């Protein structure tokens, strides 16, 4: 990695979540003082348990929907990595009001708190869902369609607010459009678990993975280490052309669900040969899903020297080892 955050004060909102806790782990290893703001709605205490005894780690249990919590958390910070959100397209369809409250009103609170505290730079989690119904592949940052879910609307509104705040108040803000992030600490339980941990959980239990559609839907599955890298590059870049914009945060390679299941089975075979005999079950496509997703990562490569460290095969190999150990501790 060419640039990292070090010797700095950093807030990670949503730091008890999957992506947030991986960021915290990296930051603490680079001699930073790290504050986490989390209300544990989706974050898990076990994700941050290893950090609680670290003198450079501080937990603030609070909610981004409360402006005072946001202001307390950003005090004295040089960087804010804003990961707190309610993810999941289905969740937003079932409960659009709460998704909007957290993802839009909460995001606005964070922007105001960051502005008032004079934070050097804010990096926030945007989403590939912003591309909506635009048919083009690979996805280019400047070409988006209409959102296909309330969740996608909220993440697009984040981008609009970030742009307005950057221009109006002279702030430095960078958005990262995450593409199907996976890796250690990604929760396999709950109604809105992501596809890779769900498939792994099913296979380990010798249960048939449930596939929405015929398995030809494809995604740019992005290993967590690539996401950690992008957050640090975005926080530290000194290229003026790289600031106050959005970037695809991905591997730049797509894999369909049938290929994904095959790769998971191949990697799990070393632990349990019977998993090779488990076949998927197919059902109707899910409302709000796009058929294919693939990122063009050239903007991040050109402006921030982003070089993914893991392709999907390498990421799955590392993730499977973590998941096997995780499930066998349960």
Image (cartoon, rainbow, N blue to C red):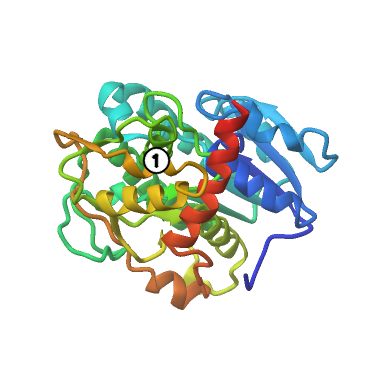
At x 48%, y 70%, the residue is 242
View extreme (bottom): residue: 302
In this picture, is 286 found above or below 61?
A: below
At x 28%, y 66%, the residue is 140
Quadrant in which the C terminus appears: top right
The percent position of residue 43, horizontal first and vertical second, equals 55, 30
The percent position of residue 325, horizontal first and vertical second, equals 60, 39
Q: Closest to the observer: 231 or 124? A: 231
Left or right: 182 as drawn, with respect to 327: left
At x 43%, y 33%, the residue is 201
Q: Residue 99 appears in which quarter of the rendering?
A: top left
View extreme (front): residue: 273
Q: Residue 76 appears in which quarter of the rendering?
A: top right
At x 58%, y 24%, the residue is 39
View extreme (right): residue: 55
What SS does tag 1 mark? helix
Q: Closest to the observer: 326 or 34? A: 326
Q: Closest to the observer: 250 or 324? A: 324
Quadrant in which the N terminus appears: bottom right
Q: Closest to the observer: 234 or 320? A: 320
In this picture, is 91 found above or below 257?
A: above
Left or right: 215 as drawn, with respect to 50: left
The percent position of residue 94, horizontal first and vertical second, equals 27, 22
Q: Which residue is mark 1?
A: 275
One can see residue 103 in this view: yes
In this picture, is 106 found above or below 248?
A: above
């Amino acid at each position: 990695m060419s640039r990292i955050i070090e010797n700095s004060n950093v807030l990670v909102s949503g730091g008890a979540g999957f992506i947030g806790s991986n960021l915290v782990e990296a930051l603490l290893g680079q001699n930073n003082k790290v504050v986490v703001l989390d209300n544990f709605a989706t974050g898990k205490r076990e994700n941050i348990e290893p950090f609680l005894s670290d003198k450079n780690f501080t937990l603030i249990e609070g909610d981004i929907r409360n402006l005072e919590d946001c202001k307390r958390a950003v005090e004295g910070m040089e960087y804010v990595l804003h990961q707190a959100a309610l993810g999941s397209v289905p969740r937003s369809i079932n409960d659009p009001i709460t998704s909007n409250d957290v993802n839009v009103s909460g995001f606005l609170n964070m922007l105001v708190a960051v502005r008032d505290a004079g934070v050097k730079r804010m990096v926030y989690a945007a989403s590939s869902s912003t591309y909506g119904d635009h048919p083009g592949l690979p996805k280019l940052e400047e070409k988006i369609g209409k959102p296909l879910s309330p969740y996608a609307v909220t993440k697009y509104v984040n981008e609009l607010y970030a742009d307005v705040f950057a221009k109006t108040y002279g702030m430095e803000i960078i958005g990262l459009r995450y593409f199907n992030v996976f890796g250690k600490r990604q929760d396999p339980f709950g109604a809105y678990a992501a596809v890779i941990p769900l498939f792994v959980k099913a296979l380990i239990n010798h249960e048939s993975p449930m596939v929405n559609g015929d398995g030809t839907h494809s995604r740019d599955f992005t290993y967590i280490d690539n996401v950690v890298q992008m957050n640090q590059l975005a926080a530290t870049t000194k290229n003026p052309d790289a600031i106050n914009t959005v970037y695809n945060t991905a591997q730049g390679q797509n894999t369909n669900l049938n290929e994904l299941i095959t790769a998971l089975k191949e990697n799990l075979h070393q632990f349990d040969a019977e998993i090779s005999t488990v076949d998927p079950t197919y059902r109707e496509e899910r409302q709000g899903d796009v058929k294919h997703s693939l990122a063009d990562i050239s903007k991040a490569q050109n402006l921030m020297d982003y070089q993914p460290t893991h392709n999907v095969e390498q990421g799955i190999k590392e993730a499977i080892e973590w998941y096997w150990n995780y499930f066998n501790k349960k």
